[in-house]
Image (spheres, grey):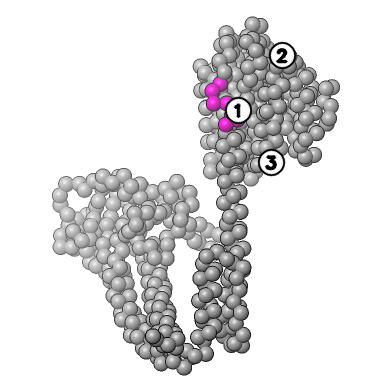
Amino acid sequence: MYSIKTKLVALITLLIIGLFTAAAFLLIREKQKELTQGIFFQTKSYAELTSENIVEDYNLFLAQKGFIYFNREITAAFTRTQDVDLIQIFNYGGTLLYDSQGEKEQQYDGPERIIQDPMLIDQIQAHNPSVFTEDGRLIFLKTITTVDEGVNFAYVDINEQPVEAIGDMEKVSYFIFPVLDEFAVAYHVDYSNLDDLLRTDMIRTIFLSVLGMVVGLFLSFFVANRITKPIKKLTEGVGIIAKGDFQYRVKINTHDEIEILGDAFNQMAVDLDKSTKALVYKERVAKELEVAQKIQEDLIPKQLPIMEGLDISAGIVPAEEIGGDVYDFINKDDNNIMFYIGDVTGHGVPSGILGSVANAMFFSKAKDASLKQIIIDVNAVIKAKSPANMFLTLCLLNWEKTKRQLTYVNAGHEQMIHFNAQTQAVDLLKGGGIALGMFPDISKMVEEQIIQMNVGDCVVMYSDGIPEAWKSQKENYGMERFKSTVQQFGNLPSATEIRNSILKNVKEFMGDYKQMDDITIIVIKKTS
């Protein structure tokens, strides 16, 4: 049987081997990161400095069949860097004009070398320089000028949307720099010098590691007896912590670094306990949010009812996972269909909950004859059961098939837009009313209205997410632009086409700006 001291010496020796191996690996890895990043930025700078000159030399010499003079300039360009082994020149149309590897001795004199790769064509014709990594990622380098940092660049895709930056260890296959919107110069990166340097550093590191391990082996004999007991405690503690008992603590009173290590171990257990609880809470909240989103999606009508005499289309685009906008279609009886659109203050989970409550109440009240009474009753419940700072604006409509009549009650919601097919005029229908949940009794604040519609007319119901859609911090969509859009598309043959055209127009206006509020729309077109 081996003594504890012998085992500890062996353990410390193995630990030292592991530490030196890890340290050697990390040192080499850091060196590789440094060299890889250096090659990236040096090659980028080299390309920035030489691309225009290379194109100028091409136009001056090679395009005029002066291969010898051009080759002399290219050869001189290669002497200024060890990290580029191939230079190619393309024109904007995607034709390879020059290849330094294939044209070392003489100028190419064959058929046009047309590039077939669509991705390479995109790079050649792009406004921004680009890189293609050995991992197959295509990244564009957009120049950014700021007051604080001066000229810098950002990593973007072909549409100038931010993408993940080049990694510390990510190698570049080639750069492509556009020149004068007519040419593009490709620089293929050579990492052979990096590999040679890493190989040399690895040999040195291995030698130093072996020397350190030998010294460590001798030192381990001197400290083995002193650290045997606390090391055993720590080993036992690791096993207990690994089983999930984060309340376990080791007690070490050696008054030296081992005691500090024991204190650090105990603090690690505390931190692990907090991190584990936080992770469990985060997963639970994410799951609950997913369930809430699914519930809200299920509340949105999957199919719109068939309304004789009307063509209906509706849609909602939430700003977050849980939206505050609501709409629904409810068959009151064989002759009446009630439907509504509403907007709860704010968005997110609280607004989604209040919207779901309102959805259920309108469904339960659907059999009441009067739209106004339904609004009054639902308001009373919302006022009594919802927070004082949360309200619901709503427009409630009813379609009576027999009379071909559309009536509505507005409770503080956006005014509906009416498109007159005969005159091509666009008007706002009467609004008014007050949001649900503000006062206990709103019976004197709301009234039922009739919408006069002729065949071909359409009415657009919407939430404020459309007129308040922003394209920048200073400009939003606005009602005038919205009315003009309805006037532009109001003659389209179906409600769905009108809805899609409006939403597309809003999306194009917003561009890449963040959607700040839920967008909901219902289009009603009279067909007979």
Task: State the residue position of label 3.
Answer: 350
The residue lying at 35 percent from left, 61 percent from top is 172
Q: Which mark is residue 521?
A: 1
Q: Is residue 135 left or right of residue 240?
A: left
Expressed as whole percent of the image width and height from the top left, the position of residue 25 reads 38, 75
Mark nearer the viewer, 2 or 3: 3
Residue 56 appears in the rendering:
no
Instruction: Describe the element under mark 2 as helix, strand or loop.
Output: strand
- Residue plotted at (57% across, 51% down): 283
Q: Are marks 1 and 2 in contact (CB under 8 Å)?
A: no
Magenta range is: 298-304
- Which residue has dot 2 on it? 450
17 inside magenta stretch: no
Amino acid type at image mark 3: Pro
Query: From the viewer's perspective, is residue 235 above or below residue 452?
Result: below
Q: Which quadrant holds residue 205?
A: bottom left
